[in-house]
Image (tube, rainbow, N blue to C red):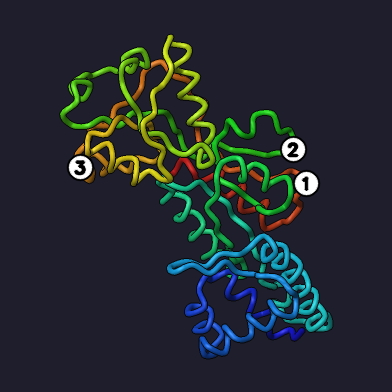
């Protein structure tokens, strides 16, 4: 196993693209692909999940990245341990960031870009994940920092968290539906409606929450369809297939026009679905602590 191959692996993992990594490394893409395949054969595992338009680390790849980063940092330290260079300590640091799918998190990217501009040695390994996996990932080291729903972290005393973005429940309604003309909507108004719900594994908290809200108001939600993402759900709403729940944090202000639907706030529902930034208290990475403080300090300024 060559150190150059480990460097190639880290580049592909952080860029999430063989093309971008090959450009960064100044080698051909076929050569890079062959070296990664040889590494996978040597390890006997698949490091990357290759799809038609995406590339992501496998679970084994995530574990290998953590160990590889540590090895390369130690090698770099050995190479510079007798140097007097001012930049000898500027070893590349990889921070694993997890965040929610479907949400409008442009502010997150702006903050990460600003932080990276000030800390050129940091690299972010970004990954979308469901709320439960984000919470668990902070405990088991899969993530260094996550942007998740506050309800998943309420009972975890090992987590340091900060409000990142306000978020509450909304309802998407076909434009011809009578409720689209109603100014204020409460859950009891939905008793006779049929719904399009996200598949539970995508967001169990929103599915369980809206089902419980229905029960509190004396009815069972009737779901005719289950969808994998927001786009599919809102497309079905526009075709009159039912109503769909979403979070305000998913709404960038263009959804009503894009899908030709009406989106309304639901009145008198819990406000415990805000999005937070969170890290594990036991993670003593100084750059991570600095990033968390930076996000906490600047979230409200965007």
Residue 172 % position (x, y): 30, 32
Tell me the number on the disc at residue 158. 2
- Quadrant location of the N terminus? bottom right
Residue at 70% x, 39% y is 159
Residue 142 position in % (x across, y down): 68, 54
Name the disc covering residue 24, or none. Answer: none
Which residue is more in the foreground, 88 or 71? 71
Question: Does residue 302 appear in the picture of this structure?
Answer: no
> Which residue is at 63% across, 81% downward?
37
**Residue that extends furthest to the top in the rendered view of this protein:** 218
Give the foreground label among 3 and 2: 3
Q: Which mark is residue 282?
A: 1
| Alpha-carbon span between mark 1 and mark 3 | 45 Å
| 302 shown above or below 53 | above
State which tag comes first along the sequence, 1 or 3.
3
User: Left or right: where does residue 250 sit relative to residue 33?
Assistant: left
Q: Quadrant of residue 171?
A: top left
**Residue furthest to the left:** 176
Look at mark 3 in the image and give the residue it sits on: 257
Local crowd size for mark 2, using a 10 Å CA cut-off: few (<14), some (14–19), many (≥20): few
**Mark 1 residue element:** loop
The quarter of the displayed image where residue 131 is located: top right
Examine the rendered structure and indicate whether residue 206 appears above or below residue 233. above
């Amino acid at each position: 196993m060559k150190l150059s191959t480990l460097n190639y692996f880290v580049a592909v993992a952080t860029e999430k693209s063989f093309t971008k990594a090959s450009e960064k490394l100044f080698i051909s893409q076929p050569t890079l692909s062959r070296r990664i395949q040889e590494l996978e054969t040597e390890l006997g595992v698949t490091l990357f999940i290759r799809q038609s338009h995406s590339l992501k680390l496998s679970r084994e790849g995530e574990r290998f990245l953590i160990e590889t980063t540590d090895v390369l940092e130690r090698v770099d330290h050995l190479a510079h341990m007798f140097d007097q260079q001012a930049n000898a300590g500027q070893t590349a640091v990889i921070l694993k960031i997890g965040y929610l799918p479907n949400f409008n998190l442009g502010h997150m990217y702006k903050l990460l870009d600003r932080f990276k501009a000030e800390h050129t040695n940091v690299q972010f390994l970004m990954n979308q994940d469901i709320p439960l996996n984000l919470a668990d990932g902070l405990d088991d080291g899969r993530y260094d920092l996550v942007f998740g729903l506050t309800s998943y972290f309420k009972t975890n005393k090992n987590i340091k968290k900060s409000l990142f973005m306000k978020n509450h429940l909304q309802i998407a309604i076909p434009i011809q539906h009578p409720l689209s003309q109603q100014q204020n909507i409460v859950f009891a108004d939905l008793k006779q409606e049929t719904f399009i719900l996200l598949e539970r594994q995508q967001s169990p908290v929103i599915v369980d929450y809206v089902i419980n809200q229905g029960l509190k108001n004396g009815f069972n939600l009737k779901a005719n369809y289950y969808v994998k993402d927001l786009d599919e759900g809102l497309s079905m709403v526009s075709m009159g297939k039912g109503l769909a729940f979403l979070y305000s944090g998913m709404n960038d202000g263009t959804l009503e026009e894009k899908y030709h639907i009406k989106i309304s706030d639901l009145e008198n529902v819990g406000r415990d679905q805000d999005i937070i930034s969170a890290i594990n208290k036991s993670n003593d990475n100084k750059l991570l602590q600095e990033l968390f403080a930076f996000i906490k300090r600047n979230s409200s300024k965007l």
